Amino acid sequence: MSTERSEQEIQRRKHLARLRELGIEPFPAAMYDANCTAASITHNYTENSTGFEAVKVAGRLLFKRIQGKASFAVLKDHTGEVQLYFNRDELCPGEDKTLYNEVFKRLIDRGDFIGVEGHVFKTQVGETSVFVKKFDLLSKALRPLPAVKTDDEGNTHDAFTDAELRYRMRYVDLVVNDEVRDTFIKRTRIMNSMRAYLNSFDYLEVETPILQAIPGGASARPFITHHNALDIPLYLRIANELYLKRLIVGGFEGVYEFAKDFRNEGMDKTHNPEFTQMEVYVAFKDYKWMMAFTENMLARIAKDVHGTTEVTFGEHCIDFKPPYARVTMQEAILKYTGVDITGMTEEQLRQACSDLGIDVDGSMGKGKLIDEIFGEKCEANYIQPTFIYDYPVEMSPLCKRHRSNPELTERFELMICGKELANAYSELNDPIDQRQRFEEQVRLMDKGDDEAMFIDEDFLRALEYGMPPTSGLGIGIDRLTMFMTNNSSIQEVLFFPQMKPEVFGAKKGPELNDNEKSVFDILSKTKQMGLNELKVQSQLSNKQWDKSIKGLRDHGLVNVAKENDSLVVSLIEE
């Protein structure tokens, strides 16, 4: 790791050394037994309150304002912020004023963890504060936090907003951006609400293997690893479906799991290779029952998190109040393309895709072709919660055939804002039909479909022992959290989204903001470009453009020179 340190980092290490010279341990081992929180003080204290005469609170120092013999500071804990008041003579009643004059004023830095003891009072301007009689350093911060400032009009300056830095250093993001912290608190509430709903039916929460000999339960490309002791390849699970169904065979009425699944596929704003899925399977139910179950569960979650079924997502107000619209796959495609897919052969579907301008390849069977049509032409139109149901049999290898049309399956997907949130079946429990579906998947694999399913002989054996009529549901927790917290990117609802590893110890280039990166990326393709053309391609406002080009020049990355009566921007290469 690089040993290059900023001026502030060097200064903090000097403070660290001086604290130790004074006999103060910057990283004490003892427990600090706080008796209240910042929120309990600010929310509950009044001038007539009792019980606030001897409070003890701990947290991170965010701000201090030195005013001679008296100073103010702000402490932040997991519940919020509270103002602190330090008086030199109250803190140091004897002749030795080192604790205030040197330790507090000079050696305690923004970001340090401290514990304070004192009584609560109201300042002359009515601010609830702790009058500090004693304080302890609990942990020294050797790096400075970003100095985010808010002016009197509520405008934020120097915000910690660079997406890559925020995702890499989520620990800093959580400290300085309260809305990020709130997103993850809501994520936990979402999962708690869902778990409480499932438990209210006495369904059993279970755990199933993550390392699997056969990657089953979904059509996806798996991650592959190797088990040294057994000397066999293993796969990180792409779904937990087949194991949960085995438990239904074993006699449980309802089972569910919050599962970490892994798919070795692309990454974008709505997909991460590692994601959280809740799957539930209930015996003696069908997909029609599961529709009502799903919409009632989502309505409860919305109320538990927001107090209402109406949730804002982007420019839309999404209402999770049941009942949701119900549209068949055939009706959706017919409405938005004019194509009736009923009874179409693979070649006819391939021609329909060509006529609709949809790119396909030779490895795609009927199911993939229909999925491409719906994905390209239909799904974006469904903003409010809508069940798309009765999928063609080729699209659903694990789903029971429709009770009145064997060309279809009893399946639904829940669409919201043009994205799939949930997927559910009347589960296929005919082992003979299931084997035939698996064999068709093998044929697709032979054609080059690297997302086709393997044959799972043990699962087929389990079905031969008999599985009752069952309905199953899968809901993406990450995507649900996106909807419930008004975040359009999956990276915003994952504490630590997958990224390329950061290189430590190498020569470090300048840190660019998003606008500077955008301009630099455009210029990197050609090495040189006319200034006006580069400005147009960047699509930045005049103010953003001026700051970006100045920043790149200050970093020594670009040069602006006049050539043939026009300004040209060139990349400076080492």
Image (cartoon, rainbow, N blue to C red):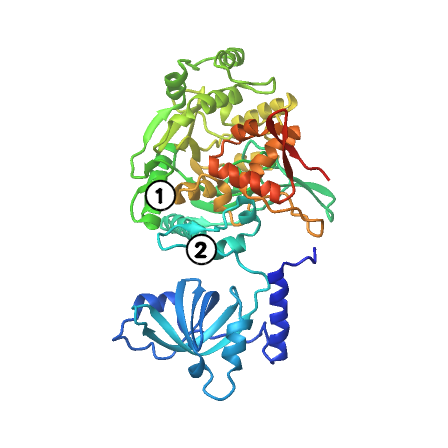
Measured from the top left, where is residue 566 in percent x and y? 59, 26
Can you tell which quarter of the image residue 481 is in? top left
Q: Which residue is mark 2?
A: 149
Residue 308: give x, y in percent of width and height: 29, 46
Tag 1, which secondary structure? helix
Give me the residue at 49% from left, 11% from top: 355
Rendered view: 362 above or below 163: above
Between the residue at mark 2 and the residue at mark 1, the CA separation in whole angstroms equals: 41 Å
Q: Nearer the viewer, residue 557 or 203?
A: 557
Q: Residues within 10 Å of mark 1 (few under 14, many from 20)?
A: some
Determine the residue located farthest toward the bottom in the rendered image: 94
The amino acid type, in three-letter code, at marker 2 is Lys
Residue 293 screen position, x and y as percent:
35, 40
- Which residue is more in the foreground, 246 or 260? 260
Mark 2 vs mark 1, foreground winner is 2
Q: Residue furthest left?
A: 48
Front-most of 455 and 352?
A: 352
Badge 2 crowding class, 10 Å Cα cut-off, few under 14, some 14 to 19, many 20 or more, is few
Q: Tell me if I can see residue 31 in this picture.
A: no
490 displayed left or right of 405: right
- Give the residue type at disc 1: Met
x and y, in percent, of residue 89 in the image: 43, 83
Looking at the image, which is closer to me, 539 or 30? 539
Q: In the picture, residue 216 is in which quadrant?
A: top right
According to the image, label 1 marks what residue? 297
Q: How many marks?
A: 2
Q: Earlier in the sequence, mark 2 or mark 1?
A: 2
